[in-house]
Amino acid sequence: MIVRRRVVAAVAAVVTIMVGLGVHRFAPDGAASDIAGDALYALLVYLLAVVIVPRRAAWVPALVAWVWCSAIELFQLTGLPVAWGDGFWPIMLVLGTVFDARDLVVYTVTVLAVATVDRFFGAAVGRPPAERGA
């Protein structure tokens, strides 16, 4: 069961990266693409946390994802992600560019939604209650 959860999360992470890069490349700049990118970023961090700690209840990767995303967003207040991105543009895909308080809301909503789905999906596939956060 744990191996399957880890594999599903890893595959979903790869798909999330591909979708995120597609949004970054092809979606017109605007609020919708920004929100979609933020949601996909939070989803990706959640999935990577599941890959690392697949036996943990859903709230553990949720907390990891929320703390990581919030810390990265607050780090943007320093201006370093933009400065570093000027020298190596891909860093902006991980660290973002400028602070936007709306992003914190998107991260929170996304992480809560994905943790809820994970918890109830775990119940549907027979994952023990201790491993799904019950």
Image (cartoon, helix red, strand yellow):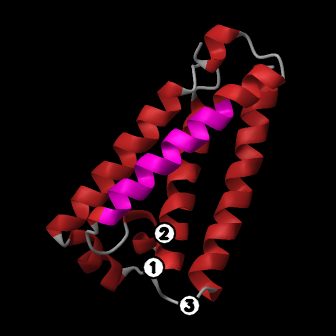
* Tag 2 and tag 1, C-beta contact below 8 Å: yes
* Residue drawn at x 71%, y 44% as measured from the top left: 10
Question: With respect to residue 87, does 119 lie above or below?
Answer: above
Question: 58 above or below 103?
Answer: above
Say which of marks 3 and 1 sits in front.
1
In this view, the residue farthest toward the bottom is 28
Q: Is residue 105 above or below residue 92?
A: above
Quarter location, residue 50: top right
Q: Is residue 89 magenta?
A: no
Comparing 118 with 86, the one in front is 118
Residue range (magenta) = 102-118
| Residue at which label 1 appears | 31
Residue 18 occupies quadrant: bottom right
* Residue pointed to by mark 3: 28
Q: Residue at 28% of width from left, 71% of height from top? A: 81
Would you name the residue on which mark 2 appears?
35
Callout 3: SS: loop
Looking at the rendered structure, the kind of residue marked 1 is Ala
The three-letter code of the residue at mark 2 reads: Ile
Q: Picture coordinates of residue 109 (x, y %)?
A: 47, 49
